[in-house]
Amino acid sequence: MIRVILFLIILGTTIYAWSYPLDGYDRTLIHRLQPAWEKHFGGNGKPSLPGGALLDSSSIEPSGNGVSELPENDPLLAAKLKQLLGNDADLYSVAIIDLSAPDKPHYIAHRDNHIANVGSVGKLLVMYALFDQLARLYPDNIPAREKILRDTIITANDWVLSDHHTVQIYDPAVGHMVRRQMRVGDSGNLWEYMDWMLSASNNSAATIVLQQVILMEKFGHDYPLATAESEAFLNKASAKELGELWLAAMYRPLVKAGFDSNRIRQGSPFTRTAKKRIQGTSSVGTVRDLAMLFNLIEAKRLVDEWSSTEAKRLLYSTQRRIRYASHPALNDAAVFFKSGSYFKCKPEPDFVCRQYMGNELNRLASTILIESPAGSPRLRYIVTVMSNVLRVNSAVAHQTLALRIHRLIESLHAIEAIDAPQSSESSKIESLAE
């Protein structure tokens, strides 16, 4: 008798958490920003966004207050953090860098050296590699870097196959923005692909950005090539050559910044077709390293100050907030966020497989910078959380943890907690899952 085992694997989820300051269209030509700005600011003047999402581009800049080296993990605060995690503490990894008092930063961690696949959070490393390439090509020419992002129009090839995530894309056939999966032949500028990769966590877009990093690594100042030239190279090159180009481009900024590539790396693309074209390696991360990656942004050292500023804008949550970032206690805060999930289910009596609730694997990872209140923050802290708690809604669990950690940081700086609106467990789940 043949025993058939059914399982479900989902890498990332179709959840929309759009980022980037809404006034950024004229500079970036990211098409979705223009109707979003008109919706929230061009009508009756009553934007339907949390207060922390209303900053303009000029207000989104790194403070320069990141740490050069992590302080020692504070044992008393680490014990409090473990207590907040409850009975499932051994299934969590958490790293917190509190920058609220720049002269006295805190580091609070639990299992911060645990290595795991961090899913879509690895797209931060694709962004890092791209900014490193731009800086190598144009070290003293910021307008040239912005011209590459704005004027390089990329037409999607079969590397985008396949991805269940959708994007907001201008469809000339209907004359307006639509939300759908990316298709072969879709086009956008490089800034737009970066936005799709980070805001919509689109795997197809991330793979195309990775592809452009490979082309920059190969052709240098001859980038961007005509579409026919780039396609000819990509079709002729071996999987080994493409993999070597990608890994060289991805490792370079990490090693330069002092990271250990055995602890943090994005080893391969995000789509099935591209994985066949590129000979890569595994993808891993730790909460400690991911928190330090965000710290580089805030310290103006993610490559350089311009790259750090643009990274922060690309990660600024301006519409729907999800998972850790969705707790009402953070409504007045500016939130800079990337998250990824990976869950797997197997047959089990009386168990129904749902999003974020795997019974064989249930990983959720988020890394986030909180500035509260937005615009004039008294609190500024970085949190990275990874968990693998089976059969629970990990999105709701992370949302609850966000409140507990926020209260912990408030207590360190003698800030009185403000009661946040409460919602029932069922309504929280409804707001977080498709």
Image (cartoon, rainbow, N blue to C red):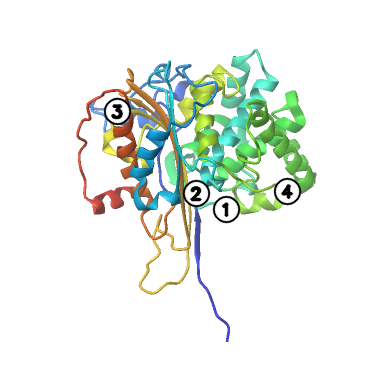
Identify the residue at the far front of this view: 76
Q: Residue at image x 48%, y 22%?
A: 298
Q: Residues within 10 Å of mark 4 (few under 14, many from 20)?
A: some
Q: Are marks 2 and 1 in contact (CB under 8 Å)?
A: yes
Q: Nearer the viewer, mark 3 or mark 2?
A: 3
**In which quadrant of the rendered image does the N terminus lie?**
bottom right
Residue assigned mark 1: 162
Instruction: Quote the CA–CA distance across marks 4 and 1.
Output: 18 Å
Image location (x, y in percent) of residue 323: 37, 44
Instruction: Quote the CA–CA distance across marks 3 and 2.
Output: 41 Å
Mark 2 or mark 1: name the one nearer the start of the chain. Answer: 1
Q: Residue at image x 55%, y 17%?
A: 305
Q: Nearer the viewer, mark 4 or mark 2?
A: 4
Mark 1 or mark 3: name the one nearer the start of the chain. Answer: 1
Image location (x, y in percent) of residue 42: 30, 25
Mark 4 or mark 1: name the one nearer the start of the chain. Answer: 1
Amino acid at dot 3: Glu
Residue assigned mark 4: 279
Residue assigned mark 2: 181
Q: Are marks 4 and 3 in contact (CB under 8 Å)?
A: no
Closest to the observer, 30 or 345: 345
Amino acid at dot 2: Gln
Locate residue 368 relative to residue 151 in the image: left or right. left
Q: Secondary structure at mark 2?
A: loop
Q: Residues within 10 Å of mark 1 (few under 14, many from 20)?
A: some
Residue 185 to residue 130: above or below: below
Q: Would you say residue 232 is visible in this rendering?
A: no
Mark 4 or mark 2: name the one nearer the start of the chain. Answer: 2
Residue 307 to residue 31: above or below: above
Locate residue 376 relative to residue 358 in the image: left or right. left
- Corner quadrant of residue 286: top right
Amino acid at dot 4: Gln
